[in-house]
Image: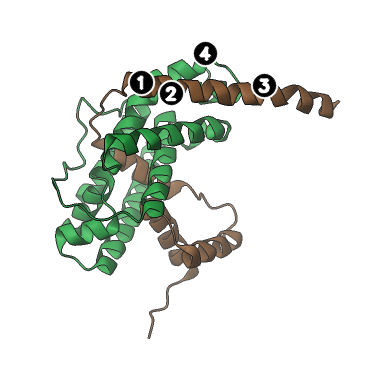
């Protein structure tokens, strides 16, 4: 099996940088564009995220998920930090969550596709309010207060529904993964 | 009266909250306390689920070329900085 790109970066392989950019540049940029108000802010965020990716590359553990998920996880953490630092004001334009569907233009493929499909199926079983807040938060990139403004739900309810929804999705994914790993026994 | 929440449930709740919107000071401190109590827990599990959902519906746009050039320059500078310190580390190990 080919050595992971992130391990190569951690070992100082400068050739791996270009490959990481080819593979994950669009992913990080698109996540940043979704969370930031303007392209200049998204560009700053993207530079911060990649610095974090280079520094964190050694921590990548392929047993815990794909490189795509690792990169997306780092990107999300950095974007959340930025939103908190900026104390972002709500904006109400274009509130139209696309839903947790896997389309051909998404980055999810292979192992990531399977995990994302599992997660999307789990979300589909949640209560409508939980689905809605998770879609607005995770797909639309809205903060909790922005979701409260968009839906008319109290802020505390938004937080509770999102937390419960994510916990439930994780539980359902664990059950499905256990069932899947037991099939071959 | 506040409802009683078992520590394990509260731990999951805080990890989920961190994955969704980050934590404020008091909740971060509470999470650190619970992390010490539940050693060996997978602290990134909820971040991975959130990342999974975030990429599932993402429409990918190519990164602008000028930005990509800056990111690659940052990476080269970072790698060069590591190389400058590496021999010292190697000598120290001998």
Q: Quadrant of residue A182?
A: top left
Lower position in the chain sequence, tag 3 or tag 2: 2
Protein chain holding label 4 = A
The x, y position of residue A12, in whole percent, is 60, 20
Q: Quadrant of residue A21?
A: top left
Lower position in the chain sequence, tag 1 or tag 3: 1
- Specify the label residue B70 is tagged with: 2
Which SS class for mark 4? helix
Which SS class for mark 3? helix
- Specify the label residue A15 is tagged with: 4
The x, y position of residue A22, in whole percent, is 38, 18
Chain in brown, by letter, is B
Q: Name the mark nearer the viewer: 3 or 2.
A: 2
Same chain check for tags 1 and 4: no
Question: In the rendered image, which residue does mark 1 sit on?
Answer: B66
| Distance between mark 2 and mark 1 Cα atoms | 6 Å
Chain in green, by letter, is A
Q: Name the mark nearer the viewer: 1 or 4.
A: 1
Q: Looking at the image, do the residues carrying marks 2 and 1 touch, with CB atoms under 8 Å apart?
A: yes
Same chain check for tags 2 and 1: yes
A148 left or right, relative to A62: left
Q: Residue at x 36, y 48 (%)?
A: A175
Which SS class for mark 2? helix
- Specify the label residue B83 is tagged with: 3
Q: Name the mark nearer the viewer: 1 or 3.
A: 1
Protein chain holding label 1 = B
Q: In the figure, B49 relative to A158: above or below?
A: above
Q: Name the mark nearer the viewer: 4 or 3.
A: 3
| Distance between mark 4 and mark 2 Cα atoms | 16 Å
Q: Looking at the image, do the residues carrying marks 1 and 3 touch, with CB atoms under 8 Å apart?
A: no
Judging depth in this view, the residue of B34 and A176 nearest the camera is: B34
Q: Is residue A184 visible?
A: no
């Amino acid at each position: 099996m080919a050595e992971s790109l992130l391990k190569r970066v951690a070992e100082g392989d400068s050739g791996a940088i270009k490959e990481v950019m080819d593979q994950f540049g669009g992913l990080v940029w698109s996540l940043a564009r979704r969370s930031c108000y303007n392209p200049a802010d998204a560009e700053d965020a993207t530079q911060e995220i990649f610095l974090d990716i280079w520094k964190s590359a050694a921590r990548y553990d392929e047993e815990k998920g794909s490189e795509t998920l690792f990169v997306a996880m780092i990107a999300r953490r950095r974007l959340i930090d930025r939103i908190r630092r900026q104390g972002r004001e709500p904006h109400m334009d274009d509130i139209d969550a696309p839903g947790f569907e896997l389309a051909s233009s998404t980055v999810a493929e292979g192992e990531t596709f399977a995990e994302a499909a599992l997660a999307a199926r789990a979300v589909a079983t949640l209560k409508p309010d939980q689905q809605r807040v998770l879609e607005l938060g995770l797909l639309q990139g809205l903060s909790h207060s922005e979701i409260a403004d968009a839906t008319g739900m109290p802020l505390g309810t938004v937080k509770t529904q999102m937390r419960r929804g994510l916990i439930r999705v994780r539980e359902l994914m664990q059950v499905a993964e256990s069932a899947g790993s037991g099939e071959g026994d | 009266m506040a409802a009683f929440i078992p520590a394990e449930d509260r731990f999951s709740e805080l990890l989920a909250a961190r994955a969704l919107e980050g934590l404020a000071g008091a909740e971060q401190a509470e999470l650190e306390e619970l992390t010490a109590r539940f050693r060996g827990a997978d602290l990134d599990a909820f971040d991975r689920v959130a990342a999974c959902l975030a990429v599932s519906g993402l429409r990918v746009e190519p990164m602008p070329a000028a930005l990509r050039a800056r990111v690659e320059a940052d990476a080269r500078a970072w790698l060069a900085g590591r190389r400058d310190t590496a021999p010292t580390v190697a000598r120290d190990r001998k």
